[in-house]
Amino acid sequence: MSCAVCGNGERVPATKPYVEEKDGRIAVVTGVPVTVCESCGETWLDAPVAHALDALLTEMLSHDTLGVRAFAASTTAA
């Protein structure tokens, strides 16, 4: 699929870390499955991954001052 942002690159599956900061707390989630444009670097999350990531970040930021966790594929299973 071609990139809707730059129109030049192809969107390819990848994994990336995601970092969120809130009220002095930091959460890092590694291995988040994304789609990335090879040309401009624009990144997309699909809906199930976005919902699972949001739930994980909410939980992490409510407890940890600094938290690092891996994104598990089973996190998106309903």
Image (cartoon, helix red, strand yellow):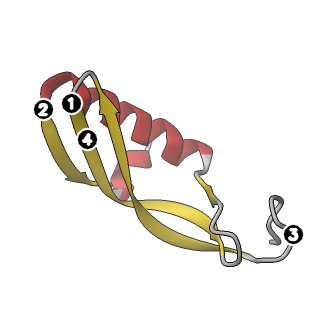
Taking the view exactly as shown, the residue that stands out farthest to the right is 7
Task: Give the camera-side residue of 27 and 1.
Answer: 27
Mark 1 and mark 4: span between their CA atoms?
7 Å
Q: In the image, is residue 72 above or below residue 2? A: above
Q: Is the C-beta separation of discs 2 and 1 under 8 Å?
A: yes
Q: Is residue 66 left or right of residue 35?
A: left
| Sequence order check, earlier mark of 3 and 4 | 3
Expressed as whole percent of the image width and height from the top left, the position of residue 28 reads 27, 48
Mark 1 and mark 3: span between their CA atoms?
37 Å
Neighbourhood count class around disc 2 (C-alpha, 10 Å): few under 14, some 14–19, many 20 upward: some
Find disc 3 in the rendering and name its residue.
7
Mark 3 and mark 2: span between their CA atoms?
40 Å
Q: Is the C-beta separation of discs 1 and 4 under 8 Å?
A: yes
Neighbourhood count class around disc 3 (C-alpha, 10 Å): few under 14, some 14–19, many 20 upward: few
Quadrant the C terminus occupies: top left
Q: Secondary structure at mark 1?
A: strand
Q: Secondary structure at mark 4?
A: strand
Neighbourhood count class around disc 1 (C-alpha, 10 Å): few under 14, some 14–19, many 20 upward: some
* Quadrant of the rendered image containing residue 41: bottom right
Circle on res. 65: 2
The amino acid on which the numbered mark 2 sits, given as a three-letter code, is Thr
Find disc 4 in the rendering and name its residue.
27
Find disc 1 in the rendering and name its residue.
25
| Sequence order check, earlier mark of 1 and 3 | 3
- Counting labels gives 4
Taking the view exactly as shown, the residue that stands out farthest to the front is 24
Q: Is the C-beta separation of discs 2 and 4 under 8 Å?
A: no
The amino acid on which the numbered mark 1 sits, given as a three-letter code, is Arg
- Tell me what residue is drawn at x 22 percent, y 27 percent: 24
Mark 2 and mark 4: span between their CA atoms?
8 Å
